[in-house]
Image: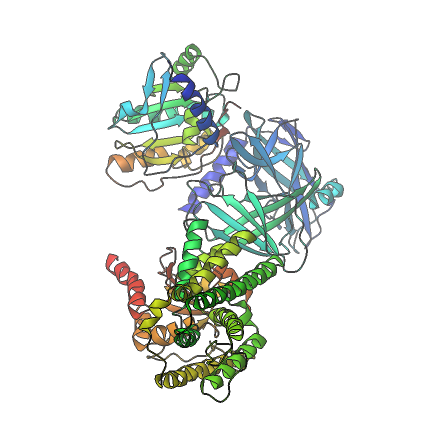
Amino acid sequence: MATSIGRFLSILFFTIWLSVPVSAEPVYDAHARVELIADTAEITPGSEFQAGVLFRMDPEWHVYWKNPGDSGLAPVFKWELPEGISAGEIRWPIPQKIDLPPLTSYGYEKEVLLAVPFKASPELNTQLPAVLRVKVEWLACKVECIPGKAELEIKTPFQANNEIFRKTESTYPAKKLPWKVEARRTEKNIQLSFFSGEAKMSLGDVYFFPENEALVSHAEPQTLTRKNQGYELQIPLSVNHPEDLESLRGVLVSREGLSAVRGWEVNVPFSSAAPAVVRPPLHLAGAVFFAFLGGLILNLMPCVLPVLSLKILSFVSEANQSRPSVLKQGLIFTAGVLFSFWVLAGALILLKAGGQQIGWGFQLQSPWFVAVLAVIFLILAFNLFGFFEIGLSLTGAGQNLSAKKGWAGTFASGVLAVVVATPCTAPFMGTALGYALTQPAWTAWIIFTALGFGLAFPYFILCANPAWLRFIPKPGPWMITLKRVLGTLLLLTVFWLGWIFSVQMGAFQIVSRNQEASAHKLSWEPYSEARLTELLAAGRPIFVDFTAAWCLTCQVNERLVLDRKETAELFKEGNIAALKADWTNRDEEVTRALASHGRNSIPFYLFYSGKGAAPVVLPEILTPKIVREALSVLDLQKEAN
Amino acid sequence: MNRKPALLPILILSLIFSAPAFSAVENNQPAPDFSLTDLDGNIRSLSEFNGKFVVLEWVNHDCPFVKKHYDQGHMQALQAEYAQKGVVWLSINSSAEGKQGNYSPEEWKGLQAEKKSAATATLLDPEGKVGKLYGAQTTPHMYVVNPDGDLIYQGAIDSIKSTNTSDIELSENYVRSALDSALSGGTVQTPFSKAYGCSVKYKS
């Protein structure tokens, strides 16, 4: 059917063309002088050469690129060639933007050579002169438009026009961008990002010419922003853009000054790795509130709990002290917490400004920090077991301290609370931290301060109202037992830190590549953007676990929820792919994935239901119920089908 | 009278903030209402045709793509055929004063008579406000509105982008397809296509 229509079309084309005289000379029509030229004089069998149509337009008139933009029509060539010679596709030089507000077209003014590569077969008959004949149809526009047509032919020996072909060579886009490119679709835009790695990139005015005619809003401005080691170009989608395009094709053009134009061909699959989640913008007040709440809840997180308990012990010993002294203790502890958060904020801001891909808990990505932390915990544990008394108690729990030493100890315990808190993310904190690190330094500073206040708040309140301390039992033998329990907790923490250290040093991996699938345990695959894109393309539901050995909240979620038999069964039932994004060591790909969701802390859980819908973000603290409910979307889909 | 001074700044502000003036319309959404004068000077609006299928055709008789569809009577035949089925056809010209395709109402009357246009009405939009409201880019640029007032098609007149009249027979006319499907209660197979043609000669 298609071929018969094609044949009919070509027959029709010929009959129409009968009325146009074939010309070996340049033809002038529709405000353009068109001429068929070649870059060789003779065609030798087995050779490759170029021939093309040179358009010379009247001033202010233009012809169009392959995507003409809002209006217009690209030139069309129909070749009539001797046997043994075949034509390729038109090689389109870098186009220019032609603005006719409110419309925008893509095309060429003044002069353009639309060249076509040719191949001569080794069996080409060279007895007779070869004739290249082309029927050209084009639309020339200034503001008004006129269609032009011509039938041109040249016969060997051609007049070789090497100079024009060579000149045109520099106007083609380069085949490949020298950078890593990614294209994503958001609700309103296409985001084209390119990373240069270490190399310096310099770009002028950048514009992306899309190949698809209906994809983008041609007249709307595209905005370029500098990102870490690269750029991001926002290209506004047209209202009626096609939804099913799998890749972005076109030409990226950079213009510096009037003459320097560089262009690169772009052909990248749309990556769904960083999905089009449009989240309501978080305001500063909201972020501060979340930070405070997060700090408050942080007290109950598994990594802070031992320190919290130590503080309770110290309260018990302080219960008999005078009110002002207790209040002072509370203030000093708060100061210690704030001080450490400020140091942390400062370090994060400075490192980020230096272009480092880091986030919350980044210091735990250093094995040496982990080692030092382990030693501190070990000393604390031994202290609690009563092996020795530390002169300057880090915990403030020592009974025989002078007031001054107690204050230093209180300050230090504030610092310690923050240090050990870093492996944890409490609910609400992720959102606030994600916001903080995308904002100017002073905003980040305010948010970190709010977080610190949240963490210190319970102690501060207790110290301000020592009356409430009466609810805690009087010191007695029970304290010895509690100390032993806490000491055990700390020892476990030391083992955990030792495990992190060994993972970081490469002794173990949290995701093994050849993990055997078992009925009782989930088989995790390591996360990569490529794998995610592949799975999304296959339409499979996907669960992504952003985790690290040093993230205690993550470990607890995994032990108590994700690694349960029931969860494994749910995953198996839904044919859900499980991806683990390991952030134990610094990993740019994982950092980038987190950043694309406005996060820079873990735990973070994503669930893609596999129907192209935006992923669902699960809370920081998982329960079997939460996971079951999140996955139940699949059952609904099944029923809908 | 004393409301005027207050209105003016609001008007100016709304003009500033309404940029970009060039918008676009979405399928299966209500087609925005508008009012324009016809060739007799009467105000006509889209809402007066509620309950009927309405075709909006952006037209400029000096454009070669429009000529392609008018010179051998194809567009007129389409207008007449669907007028019999109760479809309203509004031909809209958004050429600004002094630009190609802009004519006085009297000249337009002569032009439409000469072309044997069978449109229900020809509406003049020299300010380009309706053209920009609908995001009309080219002549021709076609829109089909259903009796509920929702947009069910927008884009090209047919599937072969050229200025050759002979291509018309070989192409699929998207307006015909959309109307036929919708008139028989079905869904439109191709609700959107990229319009092709000359640019609309908007006021700059």
Residue A317 drawn above or below residue A84: below
In the picture, residue A354 is in which quadrant?
Answer: bottom right
- Please provide percent x and percent y for residue A526: 47, 71
Residue A135 can be seen, yes or no: yes
Residue B64 drawn above or below residue A6: above
**What is the residue that sits farthest to the bottom in this orientation?**
A387
**What is the residue that sits farthest to the front in this orientation?**
A322
Q: Is residue A620 left or right of residue A267?
A: left
- Please provide percent x and percent y for residue A9: 46, 39
Residue A13 drawn above or below residue A475: above
Instruction: Kindly identify the residue that appears in the image at 71 percent across and 43 percent down.
Output: A165
In front: A345, or A586?
Answer: A345
Q: Is residue A610 left or right of residue B127?
A: left
Residue A248 drawn above or below residue A504: above
Instruction: Kindly identify the residue that appears in the image at 41 percent across and 83 percent down.
Output: A483
Q: In which quadrant will I find the C terminus of chain A? A: bottom left
- Please provide percent x and percent y for residue A317: 41, 77
- Please provide percent x and percent y for residue A21: 60, 29
In front: A256, or A90?
Answer: A256
